[in-house]
Each structure stands twice: as C-alpha cells, then as structure tokens.
Image (spheres, rainbow, N blue to C red):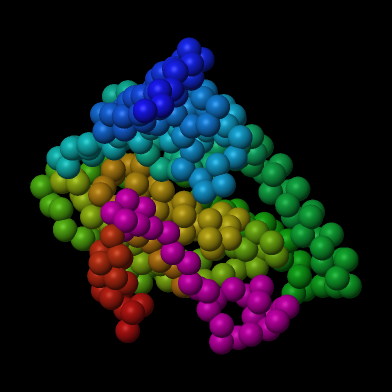
C-alpha cells in the first residue's frame, strides 16, 4: 500500500482553514446573540458604531445633521377653579386684564387720549371756545358746498350741529366704573343671561354718517351678576363715539369680560349703515351682522347655538 507523506505546509494550511471557519461561525453566533439581546447589529465597515441605524430605505450616508430634531415638550394645561368669584370695580387694587385687547381704564376714561382728557377737564370758558371753533368749522363746510350760511334757515345751523356732534360723541367722556357704579351682585347664578334688541346709534368714523341697529348681549355668570340695565348703558357708552361696527361689538364684549369675569360673553349686532345706503353702492335693504364670542361661548358650539336661537338669529 502506498503511503503518503504529510507535508508540513499542508497541515498548517488545513489548520488555518479550520480556525477561519470556526472564527466566522463564532462571529455569526455573536451577532445573532446581540440581536436577540436587543442590540443593533453592526453594519458594513463598522458603520453601526458611528450612529444609530436610519429607518429609511435608501440608507444614505450617516451624518449627525441627518438626525431629526427632538419634539418640543407638551405644555401642561392650567386648572382653573370654577368657583372663582368675579372682582368688582369697588375692590381695592388693580384688576387683572383677561381680554385680548383691554379697553377699560378704571382710573379715568374708557378710551383715554389727550383730546378726550382735555374735553373732560375743561372749564366753562374752554367749553365756549371749543364750541366756537366747531361752529366756525361747520360754517366753512356750508360755504364750501355752495350754501349761504347767513340765510334764515342756516343761521343757527352751525351751533345746532356743533352741539349735536358733542352729544353724538359723549361716550368719550364716560368710563365703565361710573356706569357700573358697583352694581355687581353675588347671586350664585350660573345660567345664561341675555338682554336683546338694544337699540344702538353710532357714527361711522369713515364718513361721519350714522349707522343704527340692535345689539344682543349674553353672558354666563361665574356666580356674580351685573344689573341688567348696565348692559345697555355699556353699549350706549361705546356707541357714542366715532366707530365701526366690528370694533363696537368687540369693545362691548371685552368690557363685560373685564368687569364681571363671567364664564363667557357673546355679543351680536345687526345694523344698517347710511354710508352704504345714502351713498356708495346705495343698497337700502342690506344689513350688517357682527359677532364677538369670548370664553365658553368660543369653546362650545352648543352654547353658541343656544344663544343664537334665543335671540332669533337661527330662525
């Protein structure tokens, strides 16, 4: 029988091959074990050690800039007490502002400015001088439109118009503190209160002609209620100014929210504007409806619909 001599180099090659296969199996088993333990397997070229594995299909080059930005933390909602009592204007200290655009200056005028402050604090001589300036301006207007201000029918017109204009704008000299006059009462009432069909007359600030209509005011108290006559008085105060209907509606709602701190306020106004009836498009049958909702009226559709149904808008 022929005998083959074993070559030393062949034995070394065979051992190396066996060791290589063993090493491969060991690495493969180790990779599976790490995967089972929850570790992420290494990618080609040790890429797993450079960053987390991306979930995209194309697997682009890893870069720290590719990582998405962390989501912002969620804001925690504040819990407000439902039994918080409403402040009254007579209480000491300043009242906090709750409306998005405060309209009340409890220490003076509701819309303070240099001109209204001077008008409020002027003496008799200054009032007469103001009236004379207004009379002269009206006389100039009459002359400019081609009229004779000295004819019988127009002799007293400048003075009458000046006094009428001061009455139309008397709301500049009033403030909510004096109007409310402490008429806020703790009655533990939490159901809707509505005063509707409040007649409103105001002056369009764009053309200085009137717009007239009706305002409906509703609120849900937080235990405290206001004297019902104060709601039309607040509407009258803001209407007796140079206005636009949108701002007038919002100012009334904000004022009630400020002084009473109710659960919510809803104000609806519908009116006819002479600036689009006597001039411009001259549409005599048109009317304009504006609405301002605050608090629970803004959050709850059912509450809004109940108010609109009670004032007759949904019919």
Q: What residue is drawn where x is 48% and y is 67%?
A: 290
Figure check: 69 above or below 224 = above
Residue 245, can we see it? yes
Residue 232, can we see it? no
Q: Position of residue 134 (x, y in %)?
A: 73, 52
Judge by depth and name the residue closer to the eye, 153 or 30. Answer: 30
Residue 5 occupies which quadrant of the picture? Answer: top left
In reply to whether residue 144 is colored magenta, the answer given is no
Q: What residue is drawn where x is 58% and y is 57%?
A: 243
Figure check: 281 above or below 151 = below
Figure check: 236 above or below 94 = below
In reply to whether residue 281 is colored magenta, the answer given is yes
Left or right: where 169 falls relative to 2? right
Picture quarter with the N terminus: top left
Residue 311 occupies which quadrant of the picture? Answer: bottom left
Q: Position of residue 2 (x, y in %)?
A: 41, 26
Question: Looking at the image, which residue sits at the far front?
Answer: 1
Left or right: where 243 falls relative to 192? right
Q: Position of residue 168 (x, y in %)?
A: 57, 58
Picture quarter with the C terminus: bottom left
Q: What residue is drawn where x is 73% and y is 61%?
A: 158
Residue 183 occupies which quadrant of the picture? Answer: top left
Judge by depth and name the residue closer to the eye, 102 or 78. Answer: 78
Bounds of the magenta span?
A: 271-299
Q: How many marks?
A: 0
Judge by depth and name the residue closer to the eye, 36 or 258. Answer: 36
């Amino acid at each position: 029988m022929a005998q083959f001599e074993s070559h030393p180099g062949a034995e070394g090659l065979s051992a190396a091959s066996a060791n290589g296969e063993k090493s491969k199996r060991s690495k493969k088993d180790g990779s599976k074990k790490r995967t089972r333990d929850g570790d992420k397997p290494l990618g080609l070229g040790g890429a797993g050690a450079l960053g987390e594995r991306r979930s995209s299909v194309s697997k682009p080059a890893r870069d720290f800039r590719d990582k998405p930005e962390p989501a912002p933390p969620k804001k925690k909602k504040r819990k407000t007490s439902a039994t918080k009592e409403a402040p009254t204007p007579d209480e000491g200290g300043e009242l906090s502002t709750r409306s998005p655009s405060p309209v009340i200056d409890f220490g003076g005028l509701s819309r303070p400015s240099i001109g209204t402050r001077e008008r409020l604090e002027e003496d008799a001589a200054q009032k007469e001088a103001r009236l004379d300036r207004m009379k002269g301006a009206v006389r100039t207007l009459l002359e400019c439109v081609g009229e004779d201000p000295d004819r019988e029918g127009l002799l007293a017109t400048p003075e009458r118009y000046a006094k009428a204009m001061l009455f139309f704008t008397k709301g500049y000299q009033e403030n909510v503190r004096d109007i409310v006059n402490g008429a806020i009462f703790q009655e533990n009432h939490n159901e809707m209160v509505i005063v509707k069909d409040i007649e409103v007359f105001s002056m369009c600030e764009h053309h200085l002609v009137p717009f007239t209509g009706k305002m409906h005011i509703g609120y849900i108290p937080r235990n405290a209620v206001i004297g019902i006559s104060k709601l039309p008085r607040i509407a009258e105060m803001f209407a007796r100014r140079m206005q636009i209907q949108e701002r007038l509606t919002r100012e009334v709602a904000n004022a009630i929210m400020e002084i009473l701190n109710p659960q919510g306020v809803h104000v609806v106004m519908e009116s006819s504007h002479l600036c689009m009836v006597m001039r411009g498009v001259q549409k005599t049958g048109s009317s304009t409806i504006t609405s301002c909702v605050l608090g629970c009226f803004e959050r709850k559709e059912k509450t809004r619909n109940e108010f609109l149904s009670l004032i007759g808008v949904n019919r």
